[in-house]
Amino acid sequence: MADKHHGGCLCGAVRYEVTGDFDAFFLCHCKHCQKDTGSAHAANLFSTKATLSWIDGHDHIQSYTVPGTRHQKAFCKTCGAAVPYTQMDGKLLVVPAGSLETPISIRPNAHIMMASKASWDDGLDEIVRLEGMPK
């Protein structure tokens, strides 16, 4: 039986289900991913076999492709949270890992595009870790 994963956006307007396995999990440090996440990297799962089904809110999704590139981001028009999309004429499913609400067994395969990583993205495993908000 194929794995099923559920997820959605921050406001809950967009809900989806992915049926099948993920082929790869990459943490991308390119400048485009830094801009569209506001962070050091994007965390995306990729599959050529899994299928995406929209449960709710498909009409709330907006998509943007950086002109002259394959860099795409799909997001909820209400809250701006990243949601899944397909590329290569529907042959490749891209799922933002943070949009999933069910656990996954796959671990990231690699940090990619390290040549363009953020200057502050070094030694992050050495800084203080807090269980909640700072006091």
Image (tube, grey):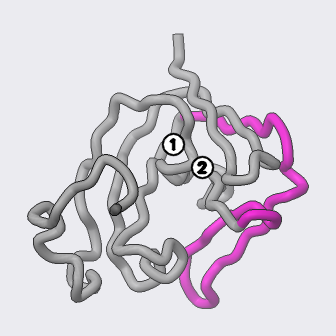
> Is 66 on the left-hand or right-hand side of 134?
right
Provide the residue designation for mark 2.
Answer: 91
Which residue is at 68% across, 38% downward? 52
Which residue is at 22% across, 88% downward? 119
Q: Is residue 63 above or below residue 20?
A: below
The quadrant in which residue 103 appears is top left
Provide the residue designation for mark 1.
Answer: 48
Q: Is residue 29 above or below residue 74?
A: below
Q: Are marks 1 and 2 in contact (CB under 8 Å)?
A: yes
The 10 Å Cα crowd at callout 2, few under 14, some 14 to 19, many 20 or more, is few
The 10 Å Cα crowd at callout 1, few under 14, some 14 to 19, many 20 or more, is some
Amino acid type for the residue under numbered disc 2: Lys
**Camera-nearest residue between 80 and 105:** 80
Which residue is at 50% across, 72% downward? 37
Q: Position of residue 9 (x, y in %)?
A: 68, 51
Q: Earlier in the sequence, mark 1 or mark 2?
A: 1
Which residues are the magenta region? 50-79
Q: Is residue 16 above or below residue 40?
A: above
Residue at mark 1 to residue at mark 2: CA–CA distance: 6 Å
> Is 124 on the left-hand or right-hand side of 101?
left
Residue at the front extreme? 135
